[in-house]
Image: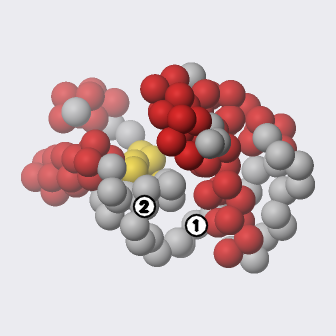
Amino acid sequence: MRAYLHARRPGFVFLPHGDDTNRTHRRTYETFHAIAIEDGLRVDTYLNLDAKTVSIRADLYMYVGEEDAAWKAQLLRFHRSQQERNLKTRGQGFDQRVLAVNRQAAVDAGGLMPCGSV
């Protein structure tokens, strides 16, 4: 990750939140954070709200319409292991679960809740 960041010198990155029940999400955040501190990287970071985020302070929201939500759902379905596991254990796909979290975040932020079911 260090070599990747130094080669690209991004102005901003999107990361999973560090307070998350998903071990891989936590490790990604921790690794990035350690590299940024150790190497003095000057980069804006945006932490994503996820279905497994335990707590987060929301400072920024990005609202999307149904067309973008449908595209996101399609991309999430490519994460086949998550899609199948969620269908089997929760009775809904990974795509549906993530979009439900996104819709609830929109409601919580006072935004308009998108109509329809993607």
The answer to which quarter of the image holds residue 114 is bottom right
Q: Earlier in the sequence, mark 2 or mark 1?
A: 2
Q: Quadrant of the C terminus?
A: top right
Left or right of 54 on screen, residue 60: right
Whether label 2 touches label 1, CB < 8 Å: no
Horizontal and vertical percent for residue 112? 84, 67
Horizontal and vertical percent for residue 80? 51, 23
Q: Is residue 41 visible?
A: no
Q: Secondary structure at mark 2?
A: loop
The residue at the point 58 percent across, 66 percent down is 60
Q: Is residue 52 above or below residue 87?
A: below
Circle 2 sits on which residue?
A: 53
Q: Is residue 105 above or below residue 118?
A: below
The answer to which quarter of the image holds residue 77 is top right
Circle 1 sits on which residue?
A: 60
Q: Which disc is residue 49 wearing?
A: none
Residue placed most toward the observer, 109 or 100: 100
